[in-house]
Image (tube, rainbow, N blue to C red):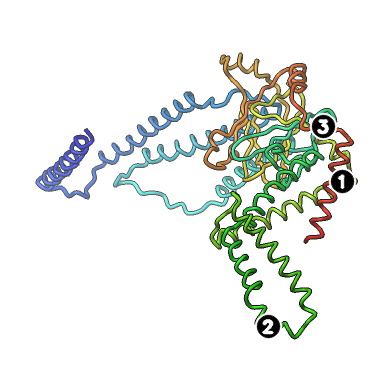
Amino acid sequence: MKLLILLVIVLGLVAAVQLSKVYQLSMSLRGKREEDISEADNRLNGNLWLAFMVAFYAGFIWLLVRYGDYAPPSASLHGEAVDWLMDFNMLIIFVVFFLVNTLLFWFSAKYYYRADRKAQFYAHDNKLELVWTVIPSIVLAILIAYGLQTWNDMTGEASDDAIRVELYSKQFDWTARYPGTDGEFGLVNYNLITPLNALGIVTEGGVQDALKEIELKIAKVESEIAYEKGHLIAEIEALEDKLHGDHHGHGHDEHADDHGHEGSFDAMASARIAEIEHMLASGKLTILTDAAYEAKEDKLYRLQRHRQRIMETRNFTYGEDLSAWDAGKDDQIVKGEFHLPLGREIEFVFRSRDVIHSAYMPHFRAQMNSVPGVPTRFKMTPIISTDSMRIILDNPDFDYVLLCNKVCGASHYNMQMKLVVESEESYEAWLAEQDEFLMKEDSEELEEEKATTEVASETITASL
Ligand SMILES: [Cu+2]
């Protein structure tokens, strides 16, 4: 089929070329040259310009009517200002578009070439220059000033009774955090991120959890290094050489004092050899290339540094501001969907674990980048509940959605979270059902754990 279409196209082209040759031949037979263009030809081309303009406008207006209404009404307060700005921009663009294109096509049609007319030479006019410089400047200044004011409204200080919600992004999902009954978000530190503490919230439990996890990893790598078969065998050989071989050749007989040391060295070496033989017989042996062994040593070093940093988090913050540690305990962490109350101001804080994401809530005309290491913020007031929007759109399955609007990796397309806007009572009821991050721990157990960590901390500091 494709071949057939190709054949038709090729034959069509050949036919067109042949026809144009016939036309040229007939022209030369009538004594006309190809370059000679009659006034009728020019008039025809001028009128075709006008015809094209009409078709162009018709297509443009059809697209506008068919697809122009791309977004449902704004579900947030500031969104109305955003929409107004967008409409105002579009209005200016449409006016300029129609004006410029009409002049372009109409002039081409009206002033087609006639042998008896000569174009006026018109090189420069200061008034014209002034008009088309000053008018766009004023219009742009208005747009920028109003746009800046709207932006400042969206990013300015939130009121004291605003509800604060943190949206945390990572490849490839969103997590929402509510500050709990105290209204304060707990401190966060990326060093404390573990599977159980995905946001790295700083609490006693969070630190313990991170330490436990890092200790396990360190123990595993330490064992892999200690039980490396090649190194163990090399160590045995070296020890046996020392025991049976070379130290007799050093003339130790001259120093009677050394005998005591040698005795203890022999004992230690034999004990170590026995230990290594026991290790070789165990099931824990690893076999690593030199490069892999070095990589393990590197990894061990990095893990130890990480452990050190977890300790430091603890030492820096603990005691100085205990309330900040407690603030994290009642934080509520929510995945899958999050809820917002209707008509209340919401202050969002955005954080990212890995790369730059962008929190995009199209129905609320809201978007903000979420940047690793730089918390960003944004405030908005939802004014249409999910239920009302379903009625407005006549779609019982409609849901608000939070999307990622920054191409952040393979599963970017599916990085989204459902958002429900409902009455304040329903919102409170939903929030009350969400788990607190860490329940208040038994204070005795807490003190005990603190003591253990301090001992461990001292050991680490001493060993470094
Ligand atoms: Cu993303």
Could you tell me if residue 277 is visible in this image? yes
Looking at the picture, tell me which residue is in the foreground, 130 or 230. Answer: 230
Q: Quadrant of residue 10?
A: top left
Q: Nearer the viewer, mark 2 or mark 1?
A: 2
Amino acid type shown at disc 1: Ala
Whether residues under marks 3 and 2 lie with C-beta atoms below 8 angstroms apart, the answer is no
Vertical relation: 165 (above or below) 397: below
Which residue is tagged 3?
159
Mark 3, Cα crowd under 10 Å, few <14 / some 14-19 / many 20+, is few
Q: CA distance from mark 3 to mark 2?
A: 84 Å
Q: Quadrant of the N terminus?
A: top left
Could you tell me if residue 149 is visible in this image? no
Expressed as whole percent of the image width and height from the top left, the position of residue 188 reads: 76, 42
Expressed as whole percent of the image width and height from the top left, the position of residue 92 reads: 57, 35
Q: Quadrant of the C terminus?
A: bottom right
Q: Earlier in the sequence, mark 2 or mark 1?
A: 2
Q: Earlier in the sequence, mark 1 or mark 3?
A: 3
Expressed as whole percent of the image width and height from the top left, the position of residue 396 reads: 58, 14
Q: CA distance from mark 1 to mark 3?
A: 42 Å
Looking at the picture, tell me which residue is in the foreground, 447 or 241. Answer: 241
Whether residues under marks 1 and 3 lie with C-beta atoms below 8 angstroms apart, the answer is no
Q: Is residue 296 left or right of residue 317?
A: left
Q: Nearer the viewer, mark 3 or mark 2?
A: 2
Looking at the picture, tell me which residue is in the foreground, 148 or 91. Answer: 148
Expressed as whole percent of the image width and height from the top left, the position of residue 190 reads: 72, 45
Which residue is tagged 1?
451
Q: Nearer the viewer, mark 1 or mark 3?
A: 1
Say which residue appears at 84% left-offset and 46% top-offset.
452
Say which residue appears at 67% left-offset and 22% top-offset.
420
- On residue 250, the disc is 2
Looking at the picture, tell me which residue is in the foreground, 140 or 131. Answer: 140
Q: Is mark 3 within 8 Å of ligand 1?
A: no
